[in-house]
């Protein structure tokens, strides 16, 4: 173990001496880009190695219930559960490369190393449809050849046991912290301490987990501790971004070379270009941008390439800000002045010709219920659950859907009893939903549901 740590430390030392990161961020005033998604103060990625059974059985459903995304680093000739991994990827989780045979890179040639990683990536990409494999975890924490790994991956994970800053020292050897009985993080308190530390410098915590409970994996972590740590993060989700290793790495790289410029600014419309210099096939995660609203604006809407963006308006110090997530190189962002407050109680935009929102069934319910609705035209849909204080509790749908009947299940297993609201926002695709004042006119409706445990 000591030998492995030394290997990675030497690696970092060499990196620091010979390679100083160069950033080419160009953000025109008064725009700012979030260090982390949503201007949160830290990021946390849970990564799981070695195909241990309870990762799919226990961890994935646990993360799903909070809307969090995780990373499963798979060894391709250790009988991966491809259908389970595919389902996880379909839910937004990441499957990364942990080589074909769990090869120790200290013992093999560069050619063998490249064959291990390229073969494993090909197998992952063949067996799982959707996003391509973009990350690697080094078996035995033994880093590989940077220049080979950089050809295949956005980032590779080592195990140097420290919390990274907002940009890792070396994308090809990102530090992780080993959890469980043989690691330094074993209790819910250990997880909390790491988080509190990361919050002091906008750090990125990458956890490395193998076994969960008694599934036979290395350094098992108790599922109760894992659940406690995830629930603690859920309670702090306004401050902490919990996301997959690959998403965090892509966000950082996009943010560090982001360009935000205005191409047009008029009384009620601003056109913005959000670009980067990276490969758009891979670097397509949205980054968070904010600006104070222009002086006489009450609120604003935004769309990118014609599709509505969720805009959050909030007061910071004495200024009212608008904040939204945009994909670099995803098309012009058009910001429009609006006088709609977007408050929860606003029902005026209900339009039965465009959609129907039905009462959930069953209701009351425990713990699952189904929410159905009907669209008369293809639309962008946002369906969220809120508690009675108006705090977002879950995002059930956020994306484009075609005309027709739709139904989505909400599993409230991890939520307390009580009355909740579900709110459907509908933005019909096309231009007809731009009102005369130029504001994006979506439709929205809110209904109540009751969880009794
Ligand atoms: Zn491993």
Image (tube, rainbow, N blue to C red):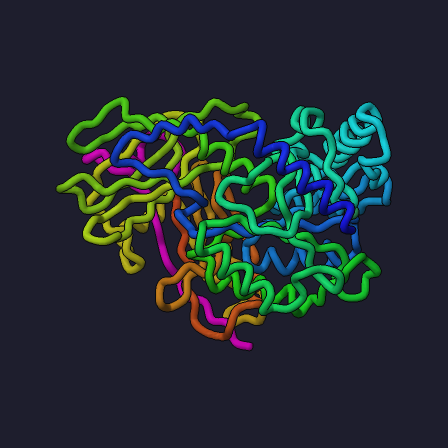
Image coordinates of residue 362 in percent, x first then y, are 54, 67
Quarter residue 294 falls in: top left
**Relative vertical location of residue 109 with respect to residue 386 in this rendering, above or below:** above
Residue at screen point 21% across, 38% down: 337
Image coordinates of residue 218 in percent, x first then y, are 80, 57
- Asked if residue 438 is among those painted magenta in the image, a careful observer would answer yes
Along the line of sight, the residue nearer the viewer: 335 or 189: 189
- Asked if residue 272 is among those painted magenta in the image, a careful observer would answer no
Regarding residue 150, the answer to whether it shows in the image is: yes
Q: For this view, does 77 lie left or right of residue 4?
A: right
Residue at screen point 76% across, 66% down: 213
Residue at screen point 43% across, 52% down: 41
Q: Quadrant of the C terminus?
A: bottom right
Q: In this picture, which residue range is highlighted in magenta? A: 427-453
Image coordinates of residue 237 in percent, x first then y, are 47, 58
Residue at screen point 75% across, 35% down: 124
Regarding residue 131, the answer to whether it shows in the image is: no
**Relative vertical location of residue 427 with respect to residue 366 in this rendering, above or below:** above
Along the line of sight, the residue nearer the viewer: 372 or 322: 322
Q: For this view, does 434 lie left or right of residue 218?
A: left
Along the line of sight, the residue nearer the viewer: 400 or 303: 303
Q: For this view, does 72 lie left or right of residue 254?
A: right
**Relative vertical location of residue 126 with respect to residue 300 in this rendering, above or below:** above
Image coordinates of residue 10 in percent, x first then y, are 68, 38
């Amino acid at each position: 173990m000591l030998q492995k740590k030394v290997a990675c430390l030497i690696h970092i030392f060499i990196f620091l001496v010979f390679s100083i990161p160069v950033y080419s961020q160009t953000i025109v005033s008064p725009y700012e880009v979030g260090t982390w998604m949503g201007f949160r103060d830290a990021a946390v990625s849970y990564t799981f190695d070695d195909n241990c059974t309870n990762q799919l059985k226990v961890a994935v459903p646990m993360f799903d219930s909070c809307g969090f995304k995780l990373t499963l680093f798979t060894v391709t000739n250790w009988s991966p559960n491809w259908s389970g991994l595919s389902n996880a990827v379909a839910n937004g989780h990441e499957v990364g490369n942990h080589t074909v045979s769990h090869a120790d890179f200290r013992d093999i040639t560069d050619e063998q190393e490249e064959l291990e990683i390229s073969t494993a990536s090909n197998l992952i990409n063949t067996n799982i449809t959707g996003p391509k494999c973009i990350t690697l975890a080094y078996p035995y924490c033994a880093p590989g050849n940077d220049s080979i790994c950089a050809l295949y991956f956005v980032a590779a994970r080592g195990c140097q046991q420290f919390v990274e800053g907002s940009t890792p020292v070396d994308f090809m050897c990102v530090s992780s912290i080993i959890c469980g009985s043989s690691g330094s993080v074993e209790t819910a308190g250990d997880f909390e301490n790491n988080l509190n530390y990361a919050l002091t410098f906008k750090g990125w915590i990458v956890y490395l987990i193998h076994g969960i409970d008694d599934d036979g994996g290395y350094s098992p972590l108790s599922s109760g501790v894992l659940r406690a740590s995830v629930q603690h993060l859920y309670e702090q989700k306004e401050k902490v971004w919990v996301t997959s290793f690959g998403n965090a790495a892509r966000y950082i790289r996009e943010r560090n070379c982001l360009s935000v410029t205005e191409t047009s600014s008029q009384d009620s419309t601003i056109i913005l270009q959000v670009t980067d210099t990276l490969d758009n096939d891979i670097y397509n995660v949205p980054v968070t941008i904010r600006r104070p609203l222009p002086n006489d604006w009450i609120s604003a809407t935004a769309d990118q390439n014609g599709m509505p963006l969720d805009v959050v308006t909030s007061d910071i110090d004495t200024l009212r800000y608008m904040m939204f997530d945009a994909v670099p190189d995803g098309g012009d962002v058009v910001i429009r002045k609006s006088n709609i407050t977007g408050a929860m109680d606003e029902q005026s935009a209900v339009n039965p010709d465009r959609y129907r929102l039905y009462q959930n069934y069953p209701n009351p319910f425990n713990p699952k219920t189904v929410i159905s609705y009907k669209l008369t035209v293809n639309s962008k849909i946002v369906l969220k659950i809120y508690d009675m204080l108006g705090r977002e509790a879950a995002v059930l749908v956020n994306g484009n859907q075609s005309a027709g009947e739709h139904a989505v299940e909400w599993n409230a297993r991890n939520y307390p009893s009580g009355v909740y609201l579900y709110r459907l926002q509908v933005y019909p695709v096309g231009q007809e939903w731009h009102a005369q004042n130029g504001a994006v006119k979506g439709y929205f409706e809110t209904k109540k549901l009751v969880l009794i445990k």
